[in-house]
Amino acid sequence: MERILAALNRMPLFGGLSREELLRFREIAQEKSFGRAEWIFSEGDEGEGFYVILEGRVKIFKLSPSGKEQILHLFGPGDSFGEVAVFEGGSFPANAQALQDTRALFFPRAAFRALLRNHPDFALKLLADLSRKLREFTMQIESLALKEIPARLASYLLYLAREQPGDGNVVTLAISKGELARLLGTIPETLSRIFARLSGQGLIRVTGRRIALLDRAGLEALAREGRIP
Amino acid sequence: MERILAALNRMPLFGGLSREELLRFREIAQEKSFGRAEWIFSEGDEGEGFYVILEGRVKIFKLSPSGKEQILHLFGPGDSFGEVAVFEGGSFPANAQALQDTRALFFPRAAFRALLRNHPDFALKLLADLSRKLREFTMQIESLALKEIPARLASYLLYLAREQPGDGNVVTLAISKGELARLLGTIPETLSRIFARLSGQGLIRVTGRRIALLDRAGLEALAREGRIP
DNA sequence: CGAATCCTTGAGTTCCCTCAAGAGAAGTGG
DNA sequence: CCACTTCTCTTGAGGGAACTCAAGGATTCG
C-alpha cells in the first residue's frame, strides 16, 4: 500500500498531491493484473473506468477487418490509458493488450469523476495529460500521412535516443521489430528491408534489438526531409 | 455582447453555465477576426491562449517539407481549438488557417487557467472536449493507416450523411474537393479519380459539391471492408 | 534439442503519387 | 453582359513505394 502511494506520487499525473489526497484516490482504485498478451479491453467495450500502469507494458491499437494492426500508443509504468471513455462517450475507442505481465490501478468512472470535482488542480493535470496525448497523435498523423517509412523509422530511432539514457548513439528497442512495424504503420517485411537499407547506407548498425546510430546528421535529415542530402 | 453570451451558451463547452459564470468567461476573452485564408497561428508558435469560433470555418493542419498538407481538423461555430498549448507544452502542435472570414473569442492562457480552478464542472466539460478530439484522432489514424482512399471517402460521405439534416441520401461538401483530398490524406488528382470510379460503380452521383448517395449498403461495405461484397 | 516464434529475403503486384495538360467554374473589370 | 484572369477540377501516362505471398534462416524458450 505504502509502495503504491509512493509509486503514484512519482507519476506526472499524481505528483504534487498531498498524502491525504493521494489516499483518497488510492481508496477508489482497484488493483488489477494482466498476463502477457492478455486483452485488457476491446474497442467498443463500455468504459467503466481507466487504468494507471504500476508495472509492465501495454499497447493500445486498432485492427482492420483484414487483421492489419496499427498501434496507437505504447504505455509503461506511470502512464494512464482509457480516460477517453471516462469523460466522453462511454466506450473505448481502441483495443488494449498487455505486452508483458502487467499490474495496474483501475479507477472507476463515477467515483473518479466525483473526486475530480473537489480537486481542480488535479483536473488541470489531467487536462495536461490529455493534451500531451493529443500532441502525440498530431505527430503520429503527420508521420503516417506525410512521411515515408524510412523517415518514420529515423524519427523513432532519434526519439528513442532522446528518451534513453546513455551517450545517445545506441538505442535498445523495448518491443519486437514486429510490434515496431505495427507502430510505424507498416508490416515486418517492409521494416526489415528498411533496416537493411539504412544499414547499407551506413546510417545505423542493427544487432538484435540494439541499434547503433552511426550518422546522426544523416538520420535527422532523413527524418526531416525524407532523404539524405 | 448579449448575443455573444447567448452564442456561448449554445456551445457544448459553455452550455449549462449560469449567467454569472458565462460573464466571467466572457470578461477574460478578446474578440478576434480573421479574413479568408489568413493564418491564425503556425506550428511551434508560443500558445498564449486558445480560440472559440463564433462564426466562420477554420482548418488545423500539418505541412511536410515538400509542401504536402494534411488537415487534422475542420472547425466551425461553437468549436474550440488551440487548447493543447494552454495545458501542455506551450507551443501549438500544428497550423491554423481561416477557410472563410471568421470571428472568434480568444481566451488568454493564464486568466483561463485561473478561472478554471474555480469551476470544476467546466473542467469536466473541457476534459470531455479533449476526449472527443482524442477519439476523432483515433478514427483518423485508423483511417490513414488501415484504409485505402476509397474506403476513407466512403466513411467521410457516410459521416456527412449522419451530420447533415435531410433524408440522408444527398450530402453537400462544406469544403472544396482539394481540401477534402488533404483531409483524407491524398491529393486532388487521386480523389478525382476515385470520385469517378465510385460514380461508375453506381455508388454515388457527383454534381459539383452535392453528392447523392445511391447505394448506402455498398458505401457502408466499402467503408468497413475496403471493398464491395 | 526440438518447437515455436520472430525475422529476413525474394518475386510479383497494386495502389497511389508525380508530372503534364486541358476543361470547367468562379470571380473581376471593362 | 461578355472577355479575361484565376482557381479548381479532371484525365492521361509513367513510375515508385510498399504490400502480398512464399519460403528459408535465426532466436528464443520449454
Image (cartoon, coloured by chain):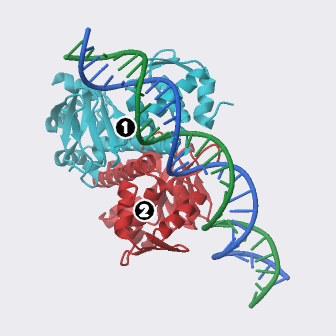
Chain colours: A cyan, B red, C blue, D green
Q: Position of residue C20 (x, y in %)?
A: 75, 56
Left or right position of A170 against A35: right
**Image height check: is B164 above or below A8?**
below
Which subunit holds the residue at mark 1?
A: A
**Image height check: is A177 above or below A132?**
above
Q: Position of residue A61 (x, y in %)?
A: 34, 41
Left or right position of D26 against A148: left
Residue type highlighted by circle 2? Ala
Q: Residues within 10 Å of mark 2 (few under 14, many from 20)?
A: many
Q: Residue at x 45, y 66 (%)?
A: B77
Q: Position of residue B76 (x, y in %)?
A: 47, 65
Q: Residue at x 62, y 60 (%)?
A: B38
Report which residue position mark 2 lands on. B154
**Image height check: is A67 above or below D10?**
above
Q: CA distance from mark 1 to mark 2?
A: 27 Å
Residue A73: which disc?
Answer: 1
Of residues B121 and D5, the one nearer the viewer is D5
Residue type highlighted by circle 1? His
Q: Residues within 10 Å of mark 1 (few under 14, many from 20)?
A: some
Left or right position of A13 against A23: right
Instruction: Name the secondary structure under disc 2.
Output: helix
